[in-house]
Image (spheres, helix red, strand yellow):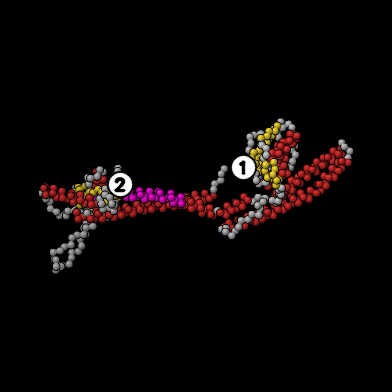
Amino acid sequence: MKLPSFRLRIALLSAALAGSTLVGFGAVSWFQIYNAKISRLDAELLNHLMRATPNFPPPEEPPAGAASSRRENSRERSRWQFYEDSLSYAFGTNTKTPVALVVLDANNNILYQSNSLPTDLEVNRLLLKRLELTPQPPPPKREPPPLPSTTNPSFERPPLIRPRPPQFVTERTTTAVWRIGAAKFPNAQIAIAVSLQAVDRDMATIRNIFLVSIPGALLLVAVGAWLVSGGALRPIRQLTSVIQQVTVKGLDQRIPIGTTDVEFVELIQVFNLMLSRLERSFTQASRFSGDAAHELKTPLTILQGELERTLQQVDPGSEVQQRLSNLLDEVRRLSGIMRKLLLLSLADAGKMSLYLVEVDMSELLMEMLEDVEMLAPHLTVETDFTDKLRVKGDRDLLIQILQNLFSNAIKYNLANGWIQIRAHQTPTTLHVTIVNTSKDIPLSDRDRIFDRFYRGDPSRNRKVEGIGLGLSLAREIARAHRGNLTLDLTPSGQTAFTLTLPMK
């Protein structure tokens, strides 16, 4: 299961927080702009309702004859038609705005109504309905009579008429949305409807701007958060890099504190102290194993020589000879273990000395092949390599790698099994693969098969000699040659190790 990225989570959370803020800001701004446009439209509507007062005929106008009445109605309709046409360009846009107008007299008779729009019937119905809901204006307030004037004694101030402030509403028809205002005067009533298509068009433009700018801003916020979090997590990456370099040859690594943020100083100090303790412990352990192997080498050599000399002095075939022979085998086994421990301690300290010469790997593989045929004649051996596969390396140490690999291929093979030896080279690398039939290696053992003194399931290794140092030493020798030794993935019932060595 792939773990989530903390850096990615920071970037996404920052983008989500910024996105919520921008969406909220955009929604509030959109509604504020919309309300501001509607308020400005209402103010213009109120202004035009008030300006329509001079167009009303005076209430005291005497009745006229039929012909005169028709002429007066025609002139009045023309006047309102002209007024309606002027309204179409009077609402703050450069284009003609659809406007509907209804004018009634004091007796609710229609003096004028729009008939130039496809939706006039529906809009006029809304205007008439709005006029019905509009309250009547208050009675005119008469001011006190003026003082006598010597200049114009017959002057009398007309009564002050103030209609009730109109209420503006938004109504929807089948094809458009309208803003409607209505006002009643003592001698007439007027209602104006203005289409909100220009406002809706402006708001759609603003909405599209938000829809484009907000995702772009979110992308910039996410990228910025990614970069900022990357800079903030740089000390963590330094820790990770140093931890990856901390091997048996890199315990002297330390993280500098001078350019680090103060929040990470304590963590880095603790980590550096831990590395110091590990370095001291490992140095002591490595020195102990090397010193112990070196100190035990001399007594074991002496013991081996004494046993060999005594073995020559006893009677052949006697019980004493058999016991001395068994002791000599164990001493030789201990000497081999000491040599491996000494080589491992040198590898741990990075002091494994290599005597580099040109080595013919094809020749070494042929020698190993002869040993296998002699030690395990019951096994079938297959080869696939060419002559003159040469590398630069320490011949004795490379022989030790091959001996360990072939020894394991024999010890852990099945009855009547087989061994395959394959080798090929590229311009830069030599690959040697040794495959043998065997029981399947559990996954838990595959990860630890190169650990020192680890031999896997005891039930599988109870009758197999060894202490679990061969593969570990072989890999250290390969790494000392700037190569590697790996356990390959194979079909069930097989085990394969691949040795890779650089050509130069």
Mark 1 or 2, nearer chain start: 2
Q: Nearer the viewer, residue 183 or 179?
A: 179
Tell me if mark 2 has few (under 14), some (14-19) or many (20+) residues whose alpha carbon lies within 10 angstroms of its own.
Answer: some
Quadrant housing residue 492: top right
Q: Give the range drawn in magenta.
A: 191-220
- How far apart marks 1 and 2 lie (CA) works out to 79 Å
**Is residue 14 something that shows in the picture?**
no
Mark 2 sits on what residue?
A: 177
Q: Residue 437: percent from the left, percent from the top?
A: 68, 34
Q: Residue 63: percent from the left, percent from the top?
A: 12, 51
Q: Residue 105: percent from the left, percent from the top?
A: 19, 50
> Could you tell whether 295 is left or right of 430 in the image?
right
Which residue corresponds to the image point at 66% horizontal and 36% vertical from the top-left? 385
> Could you tell whether 502 is left or right of 195 in the image?
right
Mark 1 sits on what residue?
A: 427
Q: Which of 390 and 144 is in front in this view?
A: 390
Mark seen at residue 303:
none
